Amino acid sequence: MNADIASHENLPTYGEQPPRPGMYLGLLHGRDHPQQQMNDWGFNGPMIGPLKWFHTTYTCTVRIAFESADDGQRYFGKSETDHELELAGDLLAFGGKYYGDWTVYCVAPEECARPADTFRRNQRSGGHWAHDRCLS
């Protein structure tokens, strides 16, 4: 099963807070087919990770390695860590969609989504209680 067949319904979208820290590949400037005329920036795609590494060879081959084979199963339908992403001209293809931009970035533990607060009657906010280093 490849990225076009695997279910991508519950994958985090680029710009969201992922559940785990690490290095991610974010897909953006999305479109439904390679020849689609773009009048805007398109849509954000998934953020893929956490990754051990990301490698491109001559803009022909894009390879990634997940920290866990379970993530390979989640994103590609194969319980493996190493995967190759398909290029369609100058676009990266994933899940039957095409992306004109992609970025690799790190997410720190304090930038991750908090787990669901299921045991409280009144849910707490999604923000962190500690001082944010950006506000200092």
Image (spheres, helix red, strand yellow):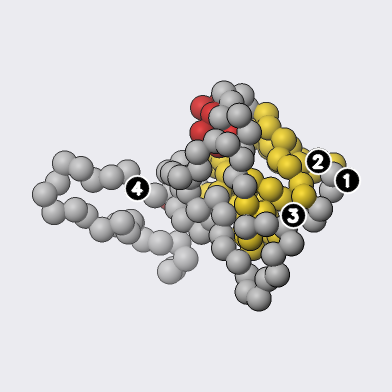
- The residue that mark 2 highlights is 61
Determine contact: label 1, label 2, CB under 8 Å.
yes
- The residue that mark 3 highlights is 91
Q: On residue 127, which mark appears?
A: none
Determine contact: label 1, label 4, CB under 8 Å.
no
Q: Earlier in the sequence, mark 3 or mark 1?
A: 1
For the C terminus, give its image quadrant.
bottom left
Judge the density around disc 3: few (<14), some (14-19), many (≥20) Cα neighbours within 10 Å.
some
Could you tell whether 23 is left or right of 16 in the image? Answer: right
For the residues labelled 1 and 4, the Cα–Cα distance comes to: 39 Å
Query: Up-down: is 16 above or below 40?
Result: above
Residue 36 quadrant: bottom right
Q: Circle 1 — which element?
A: loop
Q: Circle 4 — which element?
A: loop
Residue 109: x percent and y percent?
Answer: 46, 46
Could you tell whether 98 is left or right of 116 in the image? Answer: right
Tell me the amino acid under the disc marked 1. Tyr
Query: Up-down: is 77 above or below 117?
Result: above
Tag count: 4
Tell me the amino acid under the disc marked 3. Leu
- The residue that mark 4 highlights is 114
**Residue at x 61%, y 29% (from the top left corner):** 1
Q: Nearer the viewer, mark 3 or mark 1?
A: 3
Residue 10 quadrant: top left
- The residue that mark 1 highlights is 58
Judge the density around disc 4: few (<14), some (14-19), many (≥20) Cα neighbours within 10 Å.
some
**Residue at x 68%, y 71% (from the top left corner):** 38
Tell me the amino acid under the disc marked 2. Thr
